[in-house]
Image: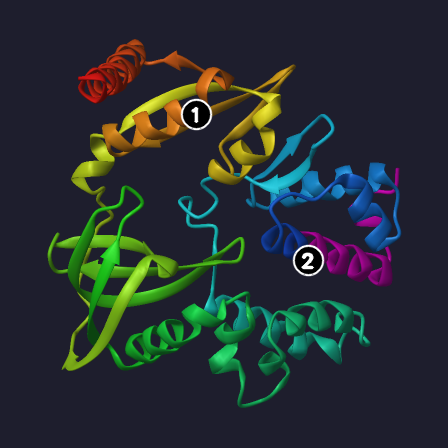
């Protein structure tokens, strides 16, 4: 095997180009197979595995899955470990590659094309500050992303109506700090005046946004969890493969294949929501833990049974 130290400048540039390309593929897609990556970059599957290991060593956590639906994907929590790409990061990466282009004899041009494909504005001198618009921003979110980008640049306070993952609707006053992108999903990093701490908000859950004239100055802030994050129900579920598609869609990044079943470890922030989800799978799901959740499901089903038994008795009289 040829060591990195003995690679020629051209070979090193080719490898760097391929590593960047694989990273971008993982950023843009949920899961990619080794075969698909090998075909795309015209290398062997063995080379793909070596490249993925190098990407892991660089600090970007890539998970490997076996089986019919196996492949590589960025580990769940990639966003939480702060190994995300911000708007400015993408612009800086492109600028550095562009500066290197002449000295490396055009070896980085393919990598620049890959970055530019994320947003055509990267290739324009005046377009890099607006790079965010082309990176998988759905049409219904584009106006909000534009407004947040403006608020961040101008240090303006924003007010928004927001619906959390648990379904709770709140009004928030925020000092927006950064726009973050992970696996095609935009997040807002902001100081929440209501909580007095830094928070992360998924842009797709922002129902209404208003950029105020009020400006703010940077302040020292720390990451803290919402109270509901501390009180969530940590559940270990086991699903039958017959509901595989639905499970993969409902619990993205939380699924692990174990023989003839899918293991899911997730957090439910409201008991009512957990019960409704679990019961909807009928006998195709088993609650591995906690035991209390099993008891809650039994009570929930029994309450439904009594409800319809009473209704049937009422209809009969």
Give SS at disc 1: strand
- Residue 111's image quarter? bottom right
Judged from the image, the secondary structure of the residue bearing numbered disc 2 is helix
Quarter of the figure with the N terminus: top right
In the image, is 70 to the left or to the right of 93? right
Answer above or below: position of 90 versus 295. Answer: below
Horizontal and vertical percent position of residue 285: 47, 18
Q: Which mark is residue 20?
A: 2
* Quadrant location, the C terminus: top left
Q: How is the image coloured?
A: rainbow
Near mark 1 (Cα within 10 A), the count class, few <14, some 14-19 or many ≥20, is some
Residue 265's disc is 1
Q: Position of residue 87 (x, y in %)?
A: 47, 69
- How would you rate the neighbour count of disc 2 (Cα within 10 Å): few for under 14, some for 14-19, many for 20 or more? some
Is residue 268 inside the magenta stretch? no
Q: Residue furthest front?
A: 317
Q: Earlier in the sequence, mark 2 or mark 1?
A: 2
- The residue depicted at 42 percent of the width and 69 percent of the height is 141
The residue depicted at 75 percent of the width and 77 percent of the height is: 103
Q: In the image, 26: left or right of 292?
A: right
How far is the residue under mark 2 from the one under mark 1?
31 Å
Rendering coords of residue 221 (x, y %):
19, 56
Q: Which contiguous range is marked in magenta?
A: 1-22
Q: Position of residue 227 (x, y in %)?
A: 16, 38
Relative to 256, 97 lies left or right: right
């Amino acid at each position: 095997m040829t060591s990195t130290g003995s690679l020629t400048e051209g070979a090193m540039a080719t490898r760097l180009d391929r590593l960047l390309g694989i990273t971008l593929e993982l950023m843009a897609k949920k899961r990619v197979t080794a075969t698909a990556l090998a075909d795309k970059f015209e290398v062997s599957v063995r080379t793909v595995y070596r490249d993925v290991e190098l990407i892991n060593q660089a600090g970007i956590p890539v998970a490997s899955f076996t089986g019919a639906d196996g492949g590589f994907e960025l580990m769940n929590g990639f966003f939480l470990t702060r190994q995300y790409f911000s708007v400015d990061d993408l612009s800086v990466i492109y600028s550095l590659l562009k500066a290197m282009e002449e000295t490396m004899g055009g070896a980085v041009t393919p990598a620049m094309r890959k970055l530019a494909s994320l947003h055509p504005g990267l290739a324009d001198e005046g377009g890099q500050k607006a790079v965010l618009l082309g990176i998988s921003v759905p049409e219904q979110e584009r106006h909000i992303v534009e407004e947040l980008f403006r608020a961040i640049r101008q240090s303006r306070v924003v007010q928004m109506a927001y619906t959390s993952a648990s379904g709770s609707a709140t009004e928030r006053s925020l000092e927006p700090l950064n726009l973050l992108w992970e696996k095609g999903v935009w997040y807002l990093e902001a100081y929440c005046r209501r909580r007095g701490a830094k928070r992360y908000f998924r842009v797709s859950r922002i129902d209404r946004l208003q950029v105020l004239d009020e400006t703010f100055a940077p302040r020292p802030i720390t990451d803290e969890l919402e109270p509901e994050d501390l009180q969530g129900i940590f559940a270990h579920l086991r699903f039958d493969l017959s509901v595989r598609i639905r499970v993969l869609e409902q619990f993205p990044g939380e699924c692990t294949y174990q023989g003839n079943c899918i293991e899911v470890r997730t957090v439910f922030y409201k008991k009512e929501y957990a019960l409704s989800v679990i019961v909807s799978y009928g006998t195709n799901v088993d609650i591995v833990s906690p035991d209390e959740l099993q008891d809650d499901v039994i009570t929930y089903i029994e309450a439904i049974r009594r409800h319809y038994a009473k209704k049937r008795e009422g209809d009969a009289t």
